[in-house]
Image (spheres, helix red, strand yellow):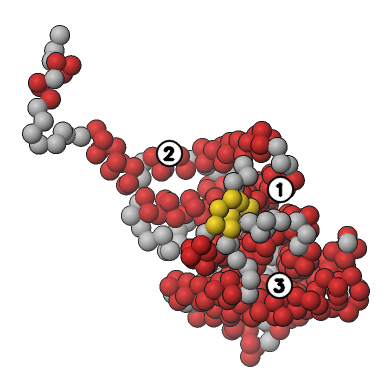
Amino acid sequence: MLDVYLLTLALAVGIGLSASIALLRLSRVARVAGFFRAGRGVGGTPLCGGIAVFLALAITPFLASALSSKADELFTPRRGDFLGFLGACALILAVGLFDDWKVVTWWQKLLVQVAAASAVYAAGYTMDRVGLPWGAEFELGVMAPVVTVLWVVFFTNAINLIDGRDGVAAGVAILCAIAMAQVASHSEHPTVALLLVASAGGVLGFLPFNLPRASAYLGDSGALLLGFILGSLSIRASTGPTEAVFIAVPIVALGFPVLDTSLAVLRRVADRRNPFLGDLDHIHHRLERAGFGPWGLLMVLYTVTVLFSAAAIILHYVEHVAIEAAVFAAFAALVVVILTQLGYIFSLWNSHLAVWLRRRVTSFEPPPGIDTRADPKNQPE
C-alpha cells in the first residue's frame, strides 16, 4: 500500500512541477501574459498555481492506475465519484481564475462555492452523522446538507485567507493533506488517501516557485481549490466504521487555517465590520509586525501546522479518553499562547463589541419598580 502512495506522490510532484514550468513559460507569451499576470497587488508575478494543482489532481489517479494494478484496484471502482468531484473542483478553479483576472465580488464567489459544495454532498461526501472525541455520536437529520455545505465552504475560504505571504498556504496545505491522508488510509478510505496524496504532490511540485521570493502565486484559483479539496476530502477521511464523521480530527489537523479564519470573522464582527471583507490583521501580518522575515514567518507557521497535524493523528489513533483530553488541553494551550503572544487577546478585549458589553455590565440599572435601597444589604453600615 505504501508503494501505491509513494508512486502517486511521485507522479503528482512530476505533473505539478512540469505544469508549473510550462505555465510560467506560457505566461511570458505576450498574447496571454495579461491573463496570467493580472491580479490584485501581484505586479508581474503570474498566478498559475491553481491550474498546476488541478492538473496534478486530475491526471495522477489515471496515470497511477495505468502503472499500478493496486492503484487501479483502489481508483477504478470510484472513478465516477471522482469525476463528479473533479467537476466541482473545476467550478471552484474557474471562479478563482476569473477572480484573479477580473475580480469577483465576495457574494458571487460564495454562491459558486455553495453550488460546488452542494455537488460534493450529492456525490456522497456527507456529514449525516457526527462523532465527538469522547465517543458520543448523533444524527444531523435534515441539517446534514446544510452542515456539509457550510463545512466545505468554510475550509475553502480558510486556505484562501492564509494565502497572504509567499509559501504559506501551499506549505500548510501540503502538511494538512499528508496528515489527513494518513488518517484516511488508517480509516480504510484508501481512495481518499490517494487523492489527498495526489493533491499534496501537485502543490509540492509548485512549491519551489512559490517560496520567498515567489516567481509564481497560487492566486485565488489555487488557494480556493486547495481549501475545497481539503474540506471535501476531510469528510470522508475522518469517517469511522459507524459512518460518523469525527470532526475533531480535521479541525485540529487544519488548526492553523481554522484559527486564522475564526479570528478574522470574530474580530471583524467585534469591530462592526463586514466579516467577508479583507483586512491586514491576519496571523502572518502580526508575525511580520513582530519582526519575522519571509523565511522566519514560514518556519513558525509550518512548525505550528506540524504540531496541529501531529495532534490530529494522535487523536485519530488513541481511544483512551484521558489521552484525548490531554491532547485537547495541549491544543487549547497552544491556541492561547498564539493569541496572547500576537496580541489578539488584547485587541479583542478592546474591540467595539467588548467595550460595549463592559459598559452595559458596569452601567447596569435594575428594572423599573425595584427599589434597591429597600434591601438591607444595600444600606450603609
Q: CA distance from mark 1 to mark 2?
A: 34 Å
Would you say 318 lies left or right of 286 here? right
Q: Is residue 222 visible?
A: no
Which one is in front, 251 or 279?
A: 251
Amino acid type assigned to the residue bearing label 3 in the image: Val
Closer to the chain start, of discs 3 and 1, is: 3
Which residue is found at the position 63% from the left and 68% from the top? Answer: 125
Which one is in front, 302 or 225?
A: 225
Q: CA distance from mark 3 to mark 1?
A: 27 Å
Q: Quadrant of the C terminus?
A: top left
Callout count: 3
Would you say 214 lies left or right of 363 here? right
Q: Pointer 2: what residue?
A: 346
Amino acid type assigned to the residue bearing label 2 in the image: Phe
Which residue is found at the position 54% from the left and 50% from the top? Answer: 259
Which one is in front, 158 or 338?
A: 158
Closer to the chain start, of discs 1 and 2, is: 1
Which residue is found at the position 82% from the left and 71% from the top? Answer: 74
| 219 vs 310: above or below | below
Q: CA distance from mark 3 to mark 2?
A: 39 Å
Which numbered tag is attached to residue 316?
1
Which one is in front, 273 or 80?
A: 80
Viewer-side label of 3, 2: 3
Which numbered tag is attached to residue 103?
none
Task: Please state the horizontal and vertical placement of residue 119, each as a whole percent of the image.
Answer: 58, 76
Amino acid type assigned to the residue bearing label 1 in the image: His
Task: Please state the horizontal and vertical placement of residue 242, each as a whole percent of the image.
Answer: 67, 56
Spot the residue most to the bottom. Answer: 31
Q: Pointer 3: what residue?
A: 53
